[in-house]
Image: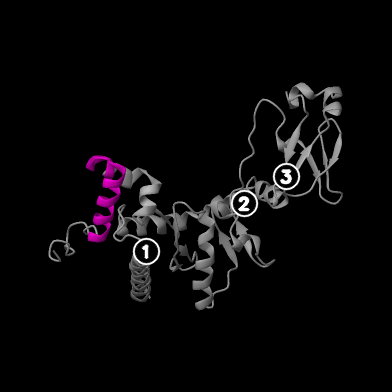
């Protein structure tokens, strides 16, 4: 039996016997066919949770100055991606690394690295877009942060609080000459205020400038690192479970870092030869 499940050098790693046995038990319990079991393990989150083979989101944390991957993290498919930053922070603390710039995508805007950031940490990220329809969108309203007042295009004002929803009175909206361009609701117009609305406005303003767009393009190097790790790791997980998958991701990160260091040595040798 052990020889049947021995890892091969060139083929895919075998499925663990315990997982096969558990799949047979669940198959008998649910009364599905073998083909349906295969489909369920790929498509059904409930089956993946029972078999401990949930797809995971890989999160390598790279250094833009050196190109090295400093830390990695794994998040199961049924958890927010931003939750991985706590494990990454623990890795960075052990390395005594201090963050000065953070280039992330929108999924990590709710992470503790962003919410608990210091004033010295610069965060570069594209803001969530504002939906623009046929009527007034949120950017048509003016937010007075000193007075905590939101001003409608027709000059009506209402108090607001970050993280809340502003409801303009239906009587005010009914008499407004711009109602047809604003809302069709008989209850009046409502505007949601994000808890970090002020910061999102700053991000949107920054990405409208040439300098801001150039700063956002620096994250392309991170995507290249992700592509390299994905090429070496493959599209199919070598191990199952949230404990073994980080080990495999760290292995691929080490391979990536060795390639980066090899390029450093090659460039240094070329500089010495040219000198």
Residue 65: mark in rendering: none
Question: Dot 1: within a 10 Å radius of its alpha carbon, few (fewer than 14), some, or many (20 or more) residues?
Answer: many
Label 1 vs label 2, nearer the camera? 1
Quick check: 238 above or below 247? above
Quick check: 178 above or below 131? above
**Magenta range:** 17-37
Of 167 and 59, the residue lying toward us: 167
Quick check: 80 above or below 189? below
Instruction: State the image coordinates of residue 156 (x, y, percent, origin top left).
Output: 86, 34
Residue 193: mark in rendering: 3
Q: Which residue is mark 2?
A: 212
In the picture, measured across the screen, residue 177 lies left or right of residue 88, that is: right
In the image, residue 120 lies in the stretch drawn in magenta: no
Instruction: State the image coordinates of residue 15 (x, y, percent, origin top left).
Output: 23, 57
Quarter of the rendering occupied by the N terminus: bottom left
Instruction: State the image coordinates of residue 174 (x, y, percent, origin top left).
Output: 83, 23
Q: Secondary structure at mark 1?
A: helix
Residue 249: mark in rendering: 1
CA separation in Å, label 1 and label 2:
32 Å
Label 3 vs label 2, nearer the camera? 3
Q: Secondary structure at mark 3?
A: loop
Of 218 and 71, the residue lying toward us: 71
How was this image coloured? one colour
């Amino acid at each position: 039996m052990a020889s049947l499940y021995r890892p091969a050098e060139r083929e895919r790693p075998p499925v663990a016997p315990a997982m096969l046995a558990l799949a047979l038990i669940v198959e008998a319990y649910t009364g599905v066919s073998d083909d349906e079991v295969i489909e369920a393990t790929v498509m059904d989150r409930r089956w993946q949770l029972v078999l401990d083979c949930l797809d995971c989101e890989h999160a390598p944390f790279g250094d833009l100055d050196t190109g090295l991957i400093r830390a990695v993290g794994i998040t199961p498919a049924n958890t927010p991606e931003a939750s991985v930053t706590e494990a990454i922070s623990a890795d960075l603390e052990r390395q005594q690394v201090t963050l000065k710039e953070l280039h992330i995508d929108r999924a990590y805007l709710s992470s503790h690295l962003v919410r608990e950031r210091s004033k010295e940490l610069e965060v570069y990220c594209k803001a969530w877009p504002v939906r623009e329809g046929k009527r007034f969108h949120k950017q048509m309203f003016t937010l007075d942060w000193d007075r905590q007042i939101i001003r409608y295009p027709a000059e009506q004002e209402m108090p607001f609080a970050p993280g809340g929803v502003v409801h303009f009175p239906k009587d005010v909206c009914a008499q407004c000459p711009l109602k047809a361009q604003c809302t069709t609701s008989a209850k009046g117009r409502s505007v949601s205020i994000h808890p970090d609305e002020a910061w999102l406005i700053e991000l949107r303003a920054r990405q409208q400038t040439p300098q801001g767009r150039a700063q956002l393009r620096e994250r392309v190097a991170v995507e290249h690192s992700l592509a390299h790790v994905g090429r070496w790791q493959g599209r199919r997980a070598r191990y199952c479970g949230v404990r073994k998958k980080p080990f495999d991701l760290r292995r691929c990160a080490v391979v990536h870092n060795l390639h980066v260091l090899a390029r450093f040595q090659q460039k240094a040798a070329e500089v010495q030869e040219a000198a």
